[in-house]
Image (cartoon, grey):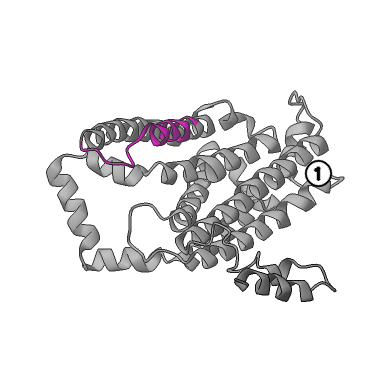
Amino acid sequence: MVNLLSIGVGVWLVAMTVLYLRGWLRLRRRGAAFANLPRLFLFGGAVLLTATVFLSPLNWLNQLYFSARVAQYVLLCLFAIPAFFTSCTFDTLVWGLPSHRRRAVGRWMRGQGAVRRMAGTLTRPWLAIVLFIVCFVAWYDSTVAGWLLAESNRHTLSLLVLGGTALLLWWHLIGTGPRLHVELSPWLAAIALLVVELASMSIAVPTTFATEPLYPHYVAAFAAGEQRALHLVDDQALGGGLIWVAGSAVYLSSIVLILNRLFHRHKMDGSKPLAGWDADERMIMPGLEHRVGQKGRSRHRP
């Protein structure tokens, strides 16, 4: 069942899409390089994934299936939000605003007012990383999950909060707008992703291999006679596997991409042979070194 908060998310997605398309067309006419077709399709995919999380049957199947609840987390926090940043959503949305609004946003970001300073302080990189890990672990706690799932709007609100912390996390890791902070060092970004991956595995592995149901809410739903396509433990293992596989794929591949960006920045992404690596002195077979001297003398012989 779609609740009021989910409807609000749908309205927000429509408004974002309109502004993004308007900004993308303006930037396209100006010849901006980042307003390209791949980013447009990536933004469309992010909108579709977010709509799937909040407006599809997943929004009520999460009451019956732990794997459906996990799928909401995976689609929103691991795929949709990184896609929004990769498609430069903020920068493009700003160009979709009226010109006076766009200039006001630019002045605010460049200014040093109290609100601007507070926003920078509250969204520092390591604070954002710790906040995401805390919310992630709490969201999968069995007691907290039971309390959240007891009311539809409450669960949707918790998913929005978790998505908000993921928004802060990926904002620092990907590095697109809004630019309120100095770019996070690639080494620190890679370490942060490794820490998040370890937190993800601490939930995924025990859940995947548990032989007994871990969530009383789903035990109660099963006992109430709700029709189910999966057994409780199988559903739980499927959910843990989703966290495990999707989390590891996203976090580890992101570490590789971040380190590759570092190597490219320092021009270390290509192999360069050492000078003189093919000199005769290096290539001669052991025991025949005297022939190198003979060869050199024959070259200089008139």
- Membership of 41 in magenta stretch: yes
Is residue 150 visible to the viewer in this orientation of the structure? no
Q: In the image, is residue 86 above or below residue 47? A: below
Residue 11: horizontal and vertical position, in percent? 36, 31
Q: In which quadrant will I find the C terminus?
A: bottom right
Q: Main secondary structure of the magenta part?
A: helix
**Quarter assignment of residue 212:** top right
Q: Label 1 sits on what residue type?
A: Pro
Q: Is mark 1 on a helix, strand or loop?
A: loop
Identified at 56% across, 45% down, the residue is 78
Identified at 54% across, 67% down, the residue is 187
Q: In this view, does 6 lie to the left or right of 62?
A: left
Q: In which quadrant will I find the N terminus?
A: top right
Q: Which residue lies furthest to the left in this view?
A: 100
Q: Is residue 44 left or right of residue 159?
A: left
Q: In the image, is residue 214 above or below residue 294? A: above
Residue 80: horizontal and vertical position, in percent? 50, 40
Q: In this view, does 285 lie to the left or right of 185?
A: right
Q: In this view, does 107 lie to the left or right of 207?
A: left
Is residue 44 visible to the viewer in this orientation of the structure? yes
Residue 189: horizontal and vertical position, in percent? 52, 62
What crowding class fits label 1: few (fewer than 14 Cα within 10 Å), some (14-19), or many (20 or more)?
some
Residue 171: horizontal and vertical position, in percent? 43, 54
- Membership of 65 in magenta stretch: no
Point out the stretch of residues depicted in magenta.
Answer: 30-48
Which one is nearer the viewer's eye here, 4 or 288? 288
- The residue carrying mark 1 is 213
Which one is nearer the viewer's eye here, 57 or 200? 200
